């Protein structure tokens, strides 16, 4: 059950349905026959970045001298801000001004799929949970995310702009609650010290 709930959390944070409009917007000036290849490349780059944070997260924290509480609170704050932008979108989208030309790594792989919030959560979880279940969870969540993003053009046709907006706002509401819970957990652990 733990793997299922962690997978769901990772899936929500990666927000594939919310990223469909971003992917379509960034790729609108790219030749249509390149869309699938670019999307595949970007989700693979995102997966590699996620694995680096999963397996090297604890060493990064130790090297930088950051506490679990600092990561949890800052990750919660970033997640909260992203969630607010999902609920109340700006004309520039979740990550600011759109990119011109063919994207590479930014903004699709990082921060759209492998953003600061998922990286903070991975580093935090890798501190006190076994790596194998986390690896399974992040891999399953990434597979579901990659599938949705690779099918972004047909999905956009099926759900339409309003359907995608409704799903993104619903996911934003869930992320707001998760971000507040992350910060509250960190504050509670500070009180116990």
Image (tube, rainbow, N blue to C red):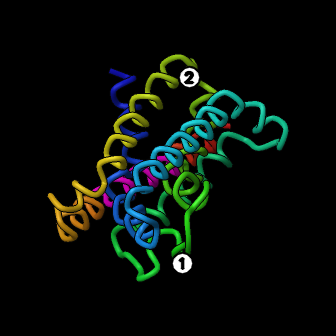
Between the residue at mark 1 and the residue at mark 2, the CA separation in whole angstroms equals 37 Å
Residue 185 at x, y percent in the picture: 51, 43
Tag of residue 97: 1
Residue 28 at x, y percent in the picture: 40, 71
Residue 166 at x, y percent in the picture: 21, 65
> Mark 1 falls on what kind of element?
loop
Q: Which residues are magenta?
A: 171-184
Give the image quarter of residue 162. Answer: bottom left
Q: Is residue 126 above or below residue 151?
A: above
- Residue 69 magenta-highlighted: no
> What secondary structure do most residues of the magenta stretch adopt?
helix
**122, 24: nearer the viewer:** 24
Give the image quarter of residue 4. Answer: top left
Question: Which part of the image, by quadrant, shows the C terminus?
Answer: top right
Residue at image x 52%, y 24%?
A: 135
Extreme residue in the bottom direction: 91
Residue at image x 65%, y 47%?
A: 71
Q: Is residue 90 above or below residue 187?
A: below
Write down the residue under mark 2: 129
Left or right of 140 in this view: 64: right
> Mark 2 falls on what kind of element?
loop
């Amino acid at each position: 059950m733990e793997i299922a709930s962690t997978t769901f959390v990772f899936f929500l944070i990666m927000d594939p349905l919310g990223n469909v409009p971003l992917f379509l917007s960034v790729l609108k000036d790219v030749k249509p026959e390149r869309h699938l290849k670019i999307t595949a490349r970007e989700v693979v780059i995102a997966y590699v970045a996620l694995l680096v944070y999963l397996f090297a997260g604890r060493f990064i924290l130790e090297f930088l001298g950051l506490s679990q509480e600092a990561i949890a609170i800052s990750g919660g704050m970033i997640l909260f801000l992203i969630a607010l932008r999902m609920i109340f979108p700006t004309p520039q989208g979740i990550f600011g001004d759109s990119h011109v030309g063919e994207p590479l790594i930014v903004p699709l792989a990082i921060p759209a799929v492998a953003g600061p919030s998922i990286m903070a959560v991975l580093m935090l979880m890798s501190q006190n949970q076994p790596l194998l279940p986390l690896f399974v969870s992040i891999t399953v969540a990434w597979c579901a995310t990659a599938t949705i993003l690779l099918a972004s053009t047909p999905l956009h046709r099926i759900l339409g702009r309003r359907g995608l907006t409704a799903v993104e706002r619903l996911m934003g509401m869930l992320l707001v609650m998760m971000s507040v819970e992350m910060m509250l957990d960190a504050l509670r652990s500070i009180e116990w010290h």
